[in-house]
Structures are given as C-alpha cells and as structure tokens.
Amino acid sequence: MSAGIDLENVCCDFGSFRAVDNANVSIKPGEFFSFLGPSGCGKTTILRMVSGFIEPTEGAIKIGGKDMRGTRPNQRPTALIFQNLALFPLMPIWENISFGLEVRGVDKATRRKKAEELLKLVDLPGAADKMVSQLSGGQKQRVAIARALAVEPQVMLLDEPLSALDLKLRQHMRAELRAIQKRTGVTFIYITHDQGEALAMSDRVGVMSQGRIQQIAAPRDIYDNPVNGFVASFVGENNIFEGDVGTVSDGMAALTGPHGTFRARVLPDAQGKALKLYVRPEHTVLSRTKAAENSVEMEVTEVAFEGAFISVHGHASAGKRIQVEVKNDGVTQVPSVGEKVFASFDAARALLLPDANVRG
Amino acid sequence: MQDLLRRYGTGLTATFCLLVAFWILVLVILPNFAMFEQSFRPYLPVVDIGGPKDFYSLGNYSKILDNPFDTAIFGIPVTMPIHIKMFLDTVFYAALVTFFCLVMAYPLAYYLAKIADPKSIPTLLLLLFVPMWVSEALRAFAWYIILTFNGPLNMLLQGLGFIDQGIRWQQGGIFTAYDAIVIVLTYCYVLFMLFPIYTAITSLDSNQIEAAEDLGSPWWRTHWRVVIPHSKPGIASGCVMVFMLSAGSLLVPTVVGSTRANWFPQTIYNFFNDALDWNTGAAYSMIFLLVCIFFVILMMRLFKVKLSDIAK
Ligand SMILES: Nc1ncnc2c1ncn2[C@@H]1O[C@H](COP(=O)(O)OP(=O)(O)OP(=O)(O)O)[C@@H](O)[C@H]1O
Ligand SMILES: [Mg+2]
C-alpha cells in the first residue's frame, strides 16, 4: 500500500524566519520524489512537517487525501529515515528492525521472523543478533531502511540518508534504494543536496532555494529545461552571459552584451523579467574559425582531462570565464593552453532565464 | 602518566601525584584502617589499654545481636535484636527515599534535557541550585518548622480542606514514624538524583526519541525502551548517591525524627559521642558500611548496571 502526499500552500515559520514558503506539491502514490536544494533551504523542515514533528504554520499536508493536521507522528502512515539514521544502539539489530512491530503488540517469534525477512530484503542476512556498533556505515544504512519498512509505511521519508557514505557505497546504495522502492511500491520522498543522486534516482525532482520550491519536473526536464537561473546553476554547470534582451519572436530572443549578440530560447512566462543566457559546457563546441552565430572568442587557460571528456577552460574579453566540455572520442580536436579559439553554441540549446524565485 | 609529564613537567607532575597519594593514604585509608583496627578491640578504661585485657575479638560486632524485642515487619510479628530492626528500618526507608527521588527527578531531568527551551535552562538550573546554598542544618530546621503541628504545611492542608485535624508529621505522621525523615531526606538529596540523570539524558540523541515516535511508539514505551536504557548509568549513580547519603544522614533524623524513629547513624553517633565507646561505634560503622555497599551491589546486579557505567 502506498499513499500520495499533497502539500497545499504549506508555510513554516521559526519565529520571524520563514523556513518554507508556500510549498505546493502533489506526490503520486508509489512515486520516487526528491527534494533537491542547497544546505538550509528547508528540505528537512518539509520532511519533518510530513512526518508530523512540526506543524505547518499555514497550509495543509494531506497523506492519502487525509488532512494530517493534529495527527501525531506515531499515528501517521509515514516512516522517516533520519539524516544520522538514529538507530537504537542498545538494542540488537533485530530488535531495532522490529521495534515498530513491538509497539504494535506483535509477539516475539513473529517479530523475529519478520526482522530476518527484512534483513534478507536489504541484503544483510545473519546480522540479526549483532549490535549497531558492529556494523559498517552502509550496513547501518540498510538496517535503518529495514526498520522503516518493518512498519509497512505508506510513505517513506529519507533525509539525505547516503550523505555519510563514501562514493562507491553511495552509488551502490542508490541502486539498492531504487530497487527496494520498486519492489515495495512505497512512495518515497527523498532529500538530497547532491544533484547527481536526485537526477539518477527520482521519478520527479523538486528543486528548492531559500524555502521556496523553484521547479518540479522529471530529472531530464530539470536539466534540459530549467525554469530559472538558480535551477540551471544548481543542477549542472553553465556558461552565463549577461546583456539586454531584445524582442521575443517564435520563442527566441537576442541578447546583446559585452561579448556580442547571442540568440537563445525564452520561456513564455519569462517575458518582462531580467534575463541572463545560460548554456551548458557540453552544449558548447570549440572551433578555430568563428561560427555563424552565438560565437565568442576565448583564450584557453586550462585543459583538464576528466576521462570520458576533457574540460577546457578559457577567458573571453573582460575576463569572462568560459568552460567547454570536449568529448574524448579521439576525433574532436583539443586545443592547448594559450591558444585562441572560438566557443559557440546552438541557439536551441541556450536558454534565457530569470534569476531564482525568491522573496521580495 | 607520560602525557602528564609532557604537559606539566616533572615538578608539577610530582606534586599532583603526591597530593593524590596524600589524599588517598592519609585522608581516606588511614582513618578507615584505624577505625577497622579499633573495632576489634574491647572498650577499656585508659589504664587497661595495651594490657592483658586488650586483645582482638568480634565482641563489638556481636553486640548488634543483643537485646531482642518483639516487633513487627510489614505487620508480621517477629522477635529480633533492636539494633538489627533499626538497621533494617534505615536501609528500607533510605531505599524509599531513593525511590521517591528517582520518581521526582526523572521527569524533571527529562523535561530539562529535552523539552525546556535551551535558553531558559541556566535560569532553571539556578533556581534548582539556590536552596543548596543554604546549609543542610538550616534546611532541616526549616522543614522542622514546616512540619510542626501548628506549622505552615498543616495550615495549608487544613485551609485547602484536605484534612480536618493537623497531622503530627514528626511523631508518627500518617504512615510511619519515619514520615518526616523520608520527606526531608527526599528534599535534601533529590538534586543528587537529578543531575546524573539530566546529564545522561542530555547525551541522548533527540533523533532517537523521534525515531521511536515515528515508528508508532507511545510516549511511555519510548521512555521504557529508549530513554531509560540510555540513561541507566545516570539513574544508577544517582540512586547510589542518594541511598548512601540518606542512609548515612545524621543531621536530618536528629532534627526532624520522632522519638520512635531511630536512624542507624544516630546509634553509631551515640556510641561515639555519648557512650564514648569508640570501639563499638567503629564496629557498627563497619557493619553499616559493608551492608550498604553489599545492598548497592545487589541492586546493581538486579538492574544489570556495571560499575564502569556509574563512573562515567
Ligand atoms: N528549530 C528551528 N528553529 C529555528 N530555525 C530553524 C529550525 N530548524 C531549522 N531552522 C532554519 O530553517 C532553515 C531550513 O532548515 P532545514 O533544516 O530545513 O534545512 P535543510 O534544507 O535540511 O539543510 P541541510 O541540507 O543542511 O540539512 C535553516 O535556515 C535553519 O536555520
Ligand atoms: Mg537537512
């Protein structure tokens, strides 16, 4: 069983500080939804409101269509996995996992059996009688997941559960989490400040900044069609050009600035706002001759080999930094440091975006 | 040791070690040993000390078995030596004091550690501490006044209509002759229970409490399974302290106790001070010390607390 979650105009104030401002999301049953945002943007606060530890100052939170106001955390069909896991160090693993069942009055033999089943599910058989301190970080992680799954929640809430793990384990656990989510069909709300994690795992991502949800979309859309400069810069790298924007026609507009005139796409609702041009390094190409449009001359200052691609950094006039990713396919030519080359991009790949959606 | 040397140099380190050695040897071991030695020798006029009558025996210890009298324990009539009865009463009521302190201190400690606004903690702790600035003797006399027959407590209770007649708290009270002693000892030592528990609960990660609640646990189970196991060392050291302090208290029973309530340290005091029989006093002290330690160890066994937990 899984339930959908609706946040309707949810605000949360701490004193005079507004930590979450007018959040509206509708998360579908069985969806893997991520909140992505920098530290302090209010992600944990949202999760704590859903699990019931904080009541929203304004707005409503509905789980499975039911308004949750006034329902204590121990009455909500959610299970929260804490940023620091919060396993019970004085109980053996199996008691940790079956604590939720103990609360529900399940007898000991059944609890033990259930705990062992769950340990198998999270690929940790034989750990039932160990203590928490005897497990590695990744194993603790899995125990925390098993403990949350034991109560058969309709919604799993995960607060940066992988942040304490090393890179290898993190990647492994990503796949594992995703698999567990598919297997159980439970709605997952996942919090992270790691864009790679959010993009790789989620069905949809909500990008947050300073308490506001900036954009909610599928990972691809977030990356390819960010709605504003914050989303574009937080998710992936960009070359940014400033200037005056001309009139819009056919969803395209020209931007004239100190580095020349560029053409790029404009979103319909972006008109009338101050816009900047954003283009991804991997959508920028290098050539020895000036391209027909959207081309800027730069001097190469650094060539960094990254394996699958080569990252070329350079300065255009007035110290403007430009970054280009060149595919390491053995065909594309890579310039050397000090060379003067032209960086150009396709108008369809560049976006004119407003700044982040922040308070007045 | 190496660390100490490196940090403070030879001179200071030597001073530290000497001071600690002085404290342990001269101020702790020597007096206790003297008492221990005295306790095996008979009480003699000065001229006989060192004479033929001065030999080691267990005579002082066996005195506790003298003077059997008829009494009752929990309503069951028994005949037992008067000092043994007094002794059992003392241990029992000291354990009761410990229990009351625990029941009062635990919720307060939890409130201070996890619920109270951190900004108000210093003020609250200060308020708790203020009474401790007054000497124990003064506090005992203050309670003497509070508990007297025409005192404020009876007046308050009568004024509120809880009782018609004043209660003679110090002379039998409502339950036993020890009411007043138990009340005042609880008051005097409750902070010794509060602080170890407070410290222990403070060190508990609040997320664990929330995790338990999130898994559906009602508040009492969260305490039973998460908070109490975590704070057990604090609870244990608080209990040991309160038990030892109240069982060994002389002042409070002397000030507020009734003629029918005899606290064991008073008996010991009488041997030392009134009878000038230091030898028997020493023997009783030894018995009292050993049995109290035994009792504490027994309780620790019962509640599965290790000595190293308490030292923390
Ligand atoms: N109990 C609180 N009292 C006052 N302010 C708070 C409280 N909890 C959070 N805040 C503030 O609310 C804002 C959002 O906090 P939150 O914990 O939701 O951030 P986050 O997005 O989870 O960050 P991180 O990625 O660092 O965990 C922060 O600026 C924080 O200072
Ligand atoms: Mg957080």
Image (tube, coloured by chain):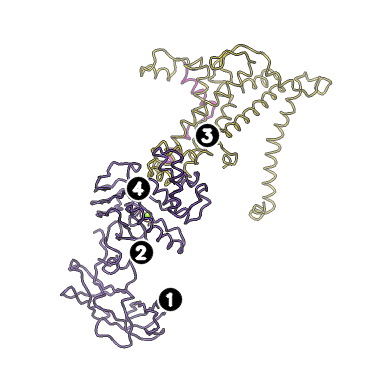
Give A319 or A280, whichever is nearer the viewer.
A280
Measured in 3D between alpha carbons, the distance from the residue under mark 3 to the one under mark 4, in whole angstroms, is 43 Å
Is residue B191 shown above or below A276?
Answer: above
- Residue B110 picture location, percent across and down: 44, 38
Corner quadrant of residue A70: top left
**A280 horizontally vs A268: left or right:** right
Mark 3 and mark 2 on one chain: no
Find numbered disc 1 in the image and state the secondary structure of the residue it sits on: loop
Q: Disc 4 residue type?
A: Pro
Task: Specify the label residue B192 is tagged with.
Answer: 3
Task: Specify the label residue A153 is tagged with.
Answer: 4
- Residue A160 picture location, percent across and down: 39, 56
Q: Which of marks 4 and 1 is nearer the N terminus?
A: 4
Give A160 or B19, whichever is nearer the viewer.
A160
Corner quadrant of residue B107: top left
Is residue B266 shown above or below B31?
Answer: above
Task: Specify the label residue A307 is tagged with.
Answer: 1
Measured in 3D between alpha carbons, the distance from the residue under mark 1 to the one under mark 3, in whole angstroms, is 64 Å
Measured in 3D between alpha carbons, the distance from the residue under mark 1 to the one under mark 2, in whole angstroms, is 20 Å
Report the chain holding disc 4: A
Q: Which of marks 2 and 4 is nearer the N terminus?
A: 4
Kindly report which numbered mark, 4 or 1, lies closer to the viewer in this rendering: 4
- The yellow-tinted chain is B
